[in-house]
Image (cartoon, rainbow, N blue to C red):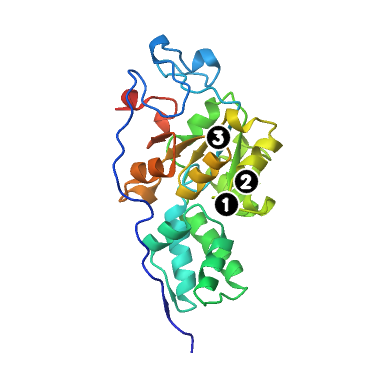
Amino acid sequence: MARSWTLPVPGSLARRKRWRTLDSGAGSFVGLNLVPKLGVIAHSMSICSHGLGKLAMFRPDLIIFDCDGVLVDSEMLSCRCLSEALAGYGIDLGVDQALDLFLGRNLSAVFEYYEALGCTIPEQFAAELKTEVRTAFVSSLCAIEGVNSVLADLQIPHCVASSSDVDRVAFSLSLTGLAPHFDAHLYTSQMVRRGKPAPDLFLYAAERMRADPRRTLVIEDSVSGVRAGKAAGMTVWGFVGGSHYQWRDGKAILREAGADRVFGRMADFWRTERQAD
């Protein structure tokens, strides 16, 4: 008879403290190259092909996108699958707990967490979870609203760096029609020794794309991803438009993690907060 494990409810992932935005006239961003008075537009900097009225706050040489929660709205689907798969082994993990503990982390983090609690997850769990996730994705996975337009207009080198395995990333992008935007420029935690929040994956992606980390922009939805990008010396924008932030204060969470900017709609990708309001 399998033992039942109840996951201890952790404290808040990040203190829900409100951060006041630093206001600098036409722009409100920390750690970015703002030139608000000059009104430099993205189009003139070749950042995007129709950037009229959008400030060129930062001109990166490379943009690295996380996949889950940034390109595809998959985080809730994934966490539900994880919760249900663990329940089959007598492990109680709520979806909210899964988000707090494992958002932006790879599957190794799940195994390590439960091993530390004295609970060994069998080897076949990974294959079972993969099957459940693929089934859920085929049924319900969607691209983040507006991201296809952002990618179509980019005139800057860009790639994906994800904690998911490369098969899942490729599958997700193919299902949602986003694969052509990235070709083979997919980098995952399988390719480095340490996953997020360590900087290894982002540094590896920048090296493969021949970009200076200091001139690289990361788009992330998780605390671990934001911390990884900052540890890599990159500018990080937090994105909170995924369904997993519908009832959570994502802006406060990601700002506290160190994000240089946080936004909630891909339509506002190149806009300042004041322009987006």
Q: Is residue 13 above or below residue 267?
A: below
SS of the residue under disc 3 = loop
Marks 2 and 3 sit apart, C-alpha to C-alpha, by 12 Å
- Residue 37 in picture, x, y percent from top left: 38, 11
Left or right of residue 249: residue 154: right
Q: Is residue 102 above or below residue 225?
A: below
Between discs 1 and 3, the one toward the N terminus: 1
Between discs 1 and 2, the one toward the N terminus: 1
Q: Crowdedness of circle 2 by 10 Å Cα count: few (<14), some, many (20+)?
A: many
From the image, state whether disc 1 or disc 3 is nearer to you.
3
Marks 1 and 3 sit apart, C-alpha to C-alpha, by 18 Å
Q: Are marks 1 and 3 in contact (CB under 8 Å)?
A: no
Q: Crowdedness of circle 1 by 10 Å Cα count: few (<14), some, many (20+)?
A: many
- Residue 197 in picture, x, y percent from top left: 54, 50
Marks 1 and 2 sit apart, C-alpha to C-alpha, by 9 Å
- The residue lying at 48 percent from left, 72 percent from top is 86
* Residue type (three-letter) at the residue carrying disc 1: Ser
- Residue 244 in picture, x, y percent from top left: 38, 51
Left or right of residue 199: residue 147: left
Task: Please state which of residues 260 and 174 is positioned toward the viewer in this rendering.
Answer: 260
Task: Please state which of residues 118 and 277 is positioned toward the viewer in this rendering.
Answer: 118
Q: Is residue 86 above or below residue 167?
A: below
SS of the residue under disc 1 = loop
From the image, state whether disc 2 or disc 3 is nearer to you.
3
Q: Which mark is residue 201?
A: 2
Between discs 2 and 3, the one toward the N terminus: 2
Q: How many marks?
A: 3
Report the quarter where the C terminus lies: top left
SS of the residue under disc 2 = helix
Q: Which residue is mark 1?
A: 163
- Residue 275 in picture, x, y percent from top left: 33, 23
Q: Which mark is residue 234?
A: 3
